[in-house]
Amino acid sequence: MVNETQHSCSASSSSRSDGGSSSGSESSKDNSRCSTPVLDADRHERLREKMRRRQDAGDKWFSLEFFPPRTANAAVNLISRRVLQGGPLFIDVTWHPAGDPGSDKETSSMIIAYTAVNYCGLETILHMTCCNQSKDDITGHLQKAKRLGLKNIMALRGDPAGEEWEEEVDGFNYAVDLVKHIRNEFDDYFDICVAGYPKGHPEAESYEADLRHLKEKVYAGADFIITQLFFRPETFLKFMKDCQAIGITCPIIPGIFPIQGYHSLRQLVKLSKLEVPQEIKDVIEPIKDNDAAIRNYGVELAVSMCRELLDSGVVHGLHFYTLNREVATTEVLKRLGIWNEDPRRPLPWAVSAHPKRRVEDVRPIFWASRPKSYIYRTQEWDDFPNGRWGNSSSPAFGELKDYYLFYLKSKSPREELLKMWGEELTSEESVFEVFTCYITGEPNRNGYKVTCMPWNDDPLATETNLLKDQLEKVNRRGILTINSQPNINGKPSTDPIVGWGPSGGYVFQKAYLEFFTSSEIVRALLKVLRRYELRVNYHIVNVKGENITNAPDLQPNAVTWGIFPGREIIQPTVVDPVSFLSWKDEAFALWIEQWAKLYEEESPSRMIIQYIHDNYYLVNLVDNDFPLENCLWQVVEDTFELLN
Amino acid sequence: MVNETQHSCSASSSSRSDGGSSSGSESSKDNSRCSTPVLDADRHERLREKMRRRQDAGDKWFSLEFFPPRTANAAVNLISRRVLQGGPLFIDVTWHPAGDPGSDKETSSMIIAYTAVNYCGLETILHMTCCNQSKDDITGHLQKAKRLGLKNIMALRGDPAGEEWEEEVDGFNYAVDLVKHIRNEFDDYFDICVAGYPKGHPEAESYEADLRHLKEKVYAGADFIITQLFFRPETFLKFMKDCQAIGITCPIIPGIFPIQGYHSLRQLVKLSKLEVPQEIKDVIEPIKDNDAAIRNYGVELAVSMCRELLDSGVVHGLHFYTLNREVATTEVLKRLGIWNEDPRRPLPWAVSAHPKRRVEDVRPIFWASRPKSYIYRTQEWDDFPNGRWGNSSSPAFGELKDYYLFYLKSKSPREELLKMWGEELTSEESVFEVFTCYITGEPNRNGYKVTCMPWNDDPLATETNLLKDQLEKVNRRGILTINSQPNINGKPSTDPIVGWGPSGGYVFQKAYLEFFTSSEIVRALLKVLRRYELRVNYHIVNVKGENITNAPDLQPNAVTWGIFPGREIIQPTVVDPVSFLSWKDEAFALWIEQWAKLYEEESPSRMIIQYIHDNYYLVNLVDNDFPLENCLWQVVEDTFELLN
């Protein structure tokens, strides 16, 4: 958001949230209750409710603005985890009429926002402007946004294409009309944000007239305001006071722009028609060629301004114009102490923010390292399992054909993958080596570290590190592990490695091990498993679907669960015999799609991978006796012993 | 069953069960799965499937036949737990045309069977005869049986009222016609049992003709056969062989009658037109006035016959004609080693056998000592919660108005209650004393033991005994406990005291304490509870419904759960804030209905109970930190300290 226009006035407040606690009051006798334990209130609240709850609790928060990058690779980077790490309350994605913002392109505003919500679990505001769009275009975009699970719109007029705003004959010419349109057509579905101008909009007749326009937007149905950037805290504080004086009572969030460089500042100032105060110019001009010095100054300035705002008691959240760069913002947030160093995981896996998935709290463990593929393959489900996997009447998994959708794609290009996984494979053993290097973190024989695998797009999880030594040992010998977890017998939910959920709880796990291995090893393994009959559940399947299991019926086995104060039991991951067969298809296909296809057809390297694909088995093992020492390593050791 | 008639032949076998294990075979890819973890296969199988599973597993079983007692008190005794203790596969209830067997009387066959199924969780066969009933009468009874949750019918012609069978003009004259009628009208809903006569039916033309009649009954749709009693094992074994020879392949269960006395034997023999073998007469006649000697002989005889039957390899279950007396049968079963000394509890509470409740696996803890009242108040529900309480869209609880329904009624008559709870109360403290004596098991000041309370129809549970010392201490001082459980951190599911569910699992509990207490104690308690804010959840309510709680929202808190091999988590009891208010109504009403009303109106004793009812609070406390030492005793101690 850089610029925005406005109009005049009428009235309504947006205090639509309520307390929810029945403490001390007479509880109602009716039987209405949540259909699922509200383990994480965030998932069940609208953005405006989250803001209010944070404000009531005295929690300070921040949000981050991004624009759609120009290339797919940049988009992959943008939606990767970085932005999540500090725990923004939301992100927003700007709308650029020239960039085909409502299209299905991987770099469109719509798709970036969709990906952030669905695949990254980020509360997201999609900007929308009146420029170059008819009323019907806008309705179409809003319908699409709703269909894609977006819940928040920043309603803007938008910057004129040329010098002056050209009237939209079939569309809207004022943000207030867009707000009204959204409310008319979509009732209360969207949370609506509008822009405020602490110095008055440059096109407004006067500061006072601009305030009246803002009030009109709020009274037309906006839920909160984000302001244009400003340079002095008193600018914002005066603006806020003036807003309140004329009856604007919704949250007003200051827009913060940490100066990151001389040129970006100049450009932004030009676009937004703001004036940089003399005292800032005085500092900057002499150091304008020293990027580091300017950035340091920018951070200092932003920190001191933000401190003053937060200390005022009227500011609860800060909105950052990142210009897709995060270094300065991250530093400001860290110094303010509102960067969340260890954001609590509400569940062991990252939740999606799509409204349909609000209740989802059980997933098969198989996709633990490929959550985006899981979300993709279940996107057509109408209901998501909660409480129990077995309760779900979920339809089948969608086929994974689009391995190259940008949000499913590996972050590493082909050349890098070849360096990691071998330019040339000479035997099955060279494949074992790749797996082993991935586990150990040691460079491979060509000196490259293996930081991802077809089944794991990221380096080894911290938790898996607990099993590193054993994993290394077995991978060397052809037990090619792709997923595992240690057993956990009641660690605090705040445990930095295995903890999840609210504090005060206890988390548990059954030991899990999943790997590809040869039919020879499988034959020995099956003999060994007879000795562990009641203790270890197994599923063993090859690419043709020949399936060997001792699981009773087709029941799921809960392998991760948590016990929390005042809550029903949460069991977020299960080993489900039915979906294992869908996962099997994907897991085997990845050998070919992601690895074999790196090599020429008919090449020995490709044939080795093809051989493994055709002949190996995918095995999963669960040790049900979670309070005892994990017996799965013993099972594997016994298997090797039998083979010798 | 004493006598029964028969007819001729056509064909079908009853092997309708299937294995269910997919071990070693290719699993189907469709998404059909159980909607609930099959923790206890028994609950999900029909009787004929249970029989087959037991047979396949090589488990020997037994069943027990009862007739409807003549008085309501005798009925209360019959359906009380005794009969369950040894783990019969089923019980059956005979049908006596003279006793209005299909009526709503508390001693009717229909109501006894209904109670056994619904309130005692017993697999039950209801007998039905053709005597004195039109086809429509029979259809009506079958419809009623189905409505009441009965699933098994023993189809009999029945004994003639006089010497000879009188033709039923509008009804049936042969059991086979009744079997056909049930299959015609109710398809496969009922499991049907028919009678077999090892010596041939007394009215049959010949032994061979009788076998053909039996085959006809089976081929008309009967699922299994129970035989008339007999005195020599070879009688049964020959009969079984003869049955198989003509194509009867369904299970045939020998009917065993342990001789319990001279006169009962004579009467039974007369009714069934059987002949007692000379070798038995020779033993019995000389000792006919010595009941104990006859019973000992009867037990010896039955044990040796049963051993021979079981050892034959063709007998898997034994059916006992108890004549409502259990001593001899129990002894035979114990000596045979098929009396189950410690029948595993599938869940911490006794499950109901009504088909609608097949999936039920969560209940509020409040009714733990009044499960029949819980079943009664939820009998109109269409769906029962499973997996999670919060998932249930259960309607409200029915009002408990019928405190005196025979299956809800206390086993103790008024005079006994007065002796236990005090002929005359002089103060609140005399009420404290009653509670304390119930806990300690010590006689009260008049020398009577307090073996039940309005909220607990049975003596203290073994589990509660773990808390006895602390409970005694707090009850003395006016914390009048009615329900409690210790915390459990992962005991084996086979633990004799707190275990439940299949073996190989682990069970857990949060400590729970529920009590009535004065407003003065509540005031102090609330101050103390502030110090335990995150650890202890509480609900405190008086009869007017003034409700104080720190429970988040209206969410249930799981307080008992179990982790089993290859299963999702089971959490059978919860503290549910919503149903607590329904329980509150019942718990307060019991002061008046069961205790105050023992005394004259306006009497001081009645006024004391009325005062407690009007002014005390019902409190429940949960300690969420189940791995630590239970802090609830400290909470109570802190409260008393604060009061001093």
Image: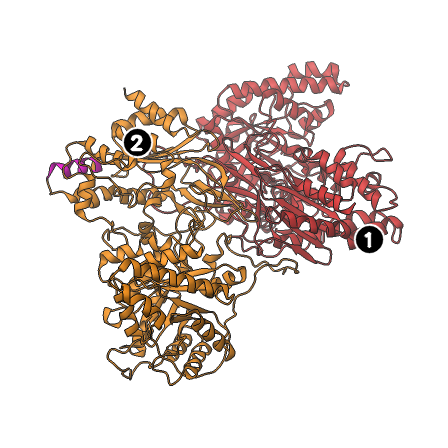
Chain colours: A red, B orange
Q: Give coordinates of residue A469: x percent, y percent.
A: 72, 34
Secondary structure at numbered mark 1 = helix
> Which stretch appears magenta?
B603-613
Residue neighbourhood size for the residue with mark 1, other residues' Cα within 10 Å, grouped as few (<14), some (14–19), many (≥20) = few
The amino acid marked with disc number 2 is: Glu
- Mark carried by residue A585: none
In the image, residue B153 sits, relative to residue B476, either above or below, namely below
Disc 1: which residue: A611
In front of the other: B16 or A20: B16
Q: Which residue: 65% across, 33% down?
A: A83
Disc 2: which residue: B472
The amino acid marked with disc number 1 is: Tyr
Q: Give coordinates of residue A489: x percent, y percent.
A: 56, 35
Position of A448 compared to B439: left or right? right
Gap between marks 2 and 1, in whole Å?
Answer: 72 Å
Position of A248 compared to A397: left or right? left
Helix, strand or loop for the magenta stretch, by majority: helix
Magenta region includes residue A91 = no
Nearest to the eye among marks 2 and 1: give it: 2
Position of A379 compared to B88: left or right? right
